Image (spheres, rainbow, N blue to C red):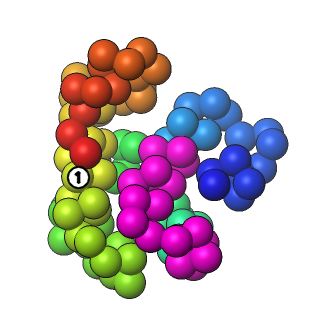
Amino acid sequence: MARFLVPKKTSSKKKEYYTLVSEFMLQQTTVPTVLNYFIPFLCRFPNLQTLAKASVEEVCIQWKGLGYYRRARSLHQAAIQITSQFDGKIPLNEQDLLSIKG
């Protein structure tokens, strides 16, 4: 989904972040529903570092309407983990990806 909403000139780092967010949002939620929340979420949390620094309450407030708040908490925890363990870069290898919560 992220590839349809992201401008072509977006950096690969941002595309990876947008993909991460869309993957969490699309778990048990339809694309039409996610479309209403994806851009506002990215406006509030434009990058991994902003998301990691936010409180879990802020993330859940922005997530409101998508349901399954465990996904929001897991996404937030993943952002913290990626920021601290992977220097803020979303890992691309399978083993590191599987070590991330959520």
Q: Quadrant of the N terminus?
A: bottom right
- State the residue at coordinates (38%, 19%): 94
Amino acid, disc 1: Ser
**Is 21 contained in the magenta span?**
yes
Tell me the SS state at disc 1.
helix
- State the residue at coordinates (53%, 78%): 33
Is 5 placed above or below 8 here? below
- State the residue at coordinates (46%, 20%): 92
**Is 98 contained in the magenta span?**
no
Range of residues picked out in magenta: 18-36
- State the residue at coordinates (23%, 70%): 69
Q: How many marks?
A: 1
Is 7 placed above or below 90 here? below
Q: Quadrant of the C terminus?
A: top left
Q: Does 55 sit left or right of 52 as displayed?
A: left
Q: Does 12 sit left or right of 52 as displayed?
A: right
Residue 35 found in image quarter: bottom right
- Coordinates of residue 3 in the picture (x, y in percent): 70, 47
Which residue carries the number 1 mark?
74
- Coordinates of residue 30 in the picture (x, y in percent): 52, 71
- Coordinates of residue 64 in the picture (x, y in percent): 34, 81
Front residue of 70 and 29: 29
Q: Main secondary structure of the magenta part?
A: helix
| Residue 76 in sight here | no
